Image (spheres, helix red, strand yellow):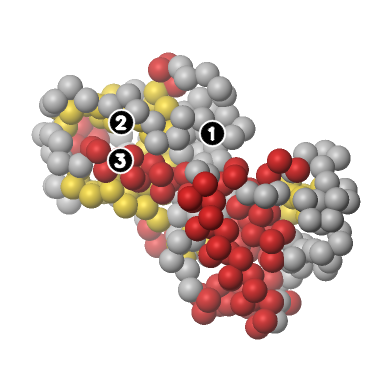
Amino acid sequence: MPEGIEVEYYRRGAEASIDRSITSLMADDLYYLKGQTSPSLLQKALIGKELIRARRIGKLLLLDVDGGDILGLRFGMTGRIIVDGSAPIEYLEYSSERNNPAWDRFIINFNDGGSMRVRDPRRLGGVELNPNLSRLGFDLYTITMQELSQVLSSSSRPVKSRLMDQSEVAGLGNLLTDEILWRASVDPRRPADSLDEKETYILYEHFKKTISELTSLGGSHMGILQDHRTRGGLCPRHGIPLERYKVGGRTTYSCPEHQKG
């Protein structure tokens, strides 16, 4: 968390920052500045300018600046965006329930007295000017059946690892991937290229439906499987113990009954 769904909410919230003149900024946490980004470069790119568009690719929020630069914001596991004191998402699963301004890692101040800030307790996100977008794969909202088939058929890695590879499918995290595979009756450990055309189609249908449904419900944590992703948890479909193991270093839950390898 946050995954692509949460960052889509952040994108919508960031639209309140569009067409407002930037008068100052706070970027004191050098660890939070990624790539070649520095406080002086941010000052030059942003002060006296306006943000003209908010867009998103996967988990990366992109804010276009009227001078031609692009401000990229990543949120790690605990980052949130707050505009004029209002957050599109008040609480993130697996993050602190506290709301401490000391966790503000980056702040833009506008000439009307408002602000946009990134609040990130664990400092796992980052700010980067003109990030390299070529490293990102197909976006979780726009990926087509043909593109998903291409992603899966070109690798023998576990299907979960393939789906979570941001250079292949941008925006899926641990919760969404487990939910999609659970709904599609696919074992997360199966080689990606072992899915046949029918299985890939079924996976794609559940992929799109899950993203749409959980976006409407408010986040990646709203899946059917989510409340059962715990030691001793039972499959919501069969009522039997879920399997718990690691795939690509990530804790994974699946049903031994309908997600057989």
Q: Could you tell which of marks 1 and 2 lies nearer the N-terminus?
A: 2
Identify the residue under disc 3: 14
Amino acid found under the numbered disc labelled 1: Leu
**Distance CA(mark 2)–CA(mark 3):** 7 Å
Give whichever of 108, 5 is nearer the camera: 5
Amino acid found under the numbered disc labelled 2: Val
Asked if marks 2 and 3 touch (Cβ < 8 Å), the reply is: yes
Q: Residues within 10 Å of mark 3 (few under 14, many from 20)?
A: many
Q: Residue 72: percent from the left, percent from the top?
A: 34, 45
Q: Could you tell which of marks 2 and 3 lies nearer the N-terminus?
A: 3
Identify the residue under disc 2: 83
Q: Residues within 10 Å of mark 2 (few under 14, many from 20)?
A: many
Residue at 40% of width from left, 56% of height from top? 57
Q: Could you tell which of marks 1 and 3 lies nearer the N-terminus?
A: 3
Q: Is residue 49 left or right of residue 115?
A: left
Q: Residue 216: percent from the left, percent from the top?
A: 48, 50
